[in-house]
Image (cartoon, rainbow, N blue to C red):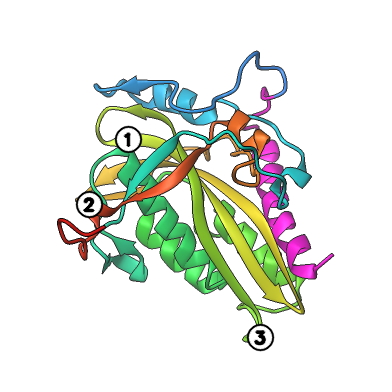
Amino acid sequence: MAVVVAALLIGGLVYGSYLALAGIGDDATAAPGVATGESDHSTVAQGAAHRDEIAAEPMLTVPERAAWPGETVSTEAPVIKIPAGTGVNGPAFVRTGFPQTPEGAIGQLAQIDLAVLQSMSLTTAEEVYNAWARPGGVRAEDWWITASVRAFLTSTDMGEVKDPSSSVSLEPAAALVKGTDGPDWTTVCVLMKVSASYKQEAQIAFAHCERMQWVGGRWMVAPGAPPAPAPATWPGTQLAHQAGWRTWSTDATTDPDHIEGDH
């Protein structure tokens, strides 16, 4: 198998190990049900304890091989429309301009992930996290995305940044809203198709959930323990449907370049 795929898989395992050590999501196998979409939509904020419950609710447990390209099913999953944002770069050169909606939070989280994972740089990971995370969460070096970058670089013996001969690209493929607590807080998840090239080419699915909070006109990573891990399933497969992933569709009407009447 391509060494890059092993590295990306290790990135996911790092997150699982981190959660286990932190005591997060330990009840996943014992829980009678799992979160497969918005389980709670609170229009009025109920507070920290309620938010912790939403974030910690376990999601579908899937085998590692579920992240590899697999057979898609004919039944189409529900679609979730994600706003395009304004196209303006915010702090740490992360694209921003997403509305104060759960779907806007998904769009912002995807841009945070894209900025870090396509660069595969530890410096970039810490800069982005420090610019986009509120105090009260994990440290930048302990953030799951930083750990995934570190695992990739370590497994490929690249040092602090990825080798110029390598490339990593990501495409948002699916998403879901796990829960909300008032208009300023939500836990959302994104599912990416990752294509990587280093000596060999490979693809894999990469899933990520975060608490998000609306602060100062933008969505930021909210304080608190990391959410239960999202199921990394190849988009469009039966397992992806079971996990509750909704097919990503960019809402063209929110694109700053959109002209009314274009088709």
Closer to us: 59 or 254: 254
Closer to us: 94 or 154: 94
- Amino acid at the residue labelled 1: Trp
Q: Position of residue 109 (x, y in %)?
A: 41, 51
Task: Report which residue position mark 1 lands on.
Answer: 185
Q: Residue at x 84, y 64 (%)?
A: 1
Q: Position of residue 158 (x, y in %)?
A: 70, 79
On the image, which quarter does residue 30 sit in? top right
Task: Report which residue position mark 2 lands on.
Answer: 253
Q: Residue furthest bottom?
A: 164
Q: Earlier in the sequence, mark 3 or mark 2?
A: 3
Query: Is 20 a magenta residue?
Result: yes
Task: Report which residue position mark 3 lands on.
Answer: 165
Closer to us: 171 or 28: 171
| Residue stretch in magenta | 1-28
Q: Residue at x 61, y 37 (%)?
A: 74
Q: Main secondary structure of the magenta part?
A: helix
Q: Position of residue 52 (x, y in %)?
A: 46, 27
Q: Earlier in the sequence, mark 2 or mark 1?
A: 1
Q: Is residue 104 above or below residue 48?
A: below
Question: Can residue 134 be seen here?
Answer: no
Give the distance between the C-alpha atoms of the residues marked 3 and 2, in whole angstroms.
38 Å
- Amino acid at the residue labelled 3: Ser
Lateral position of residue 43 relative to residue 231, left or right: left
Instruction: Give the crowd class for mark 2: few <14, some 14-19, many >=20 residues within 10 Å.
Output: few
Q: Position of residue 87 (x, y in %)?
A: 27, 65
Where disc 2 sits, the SS reads helix
Where disc 3 sits, the SS reads loop
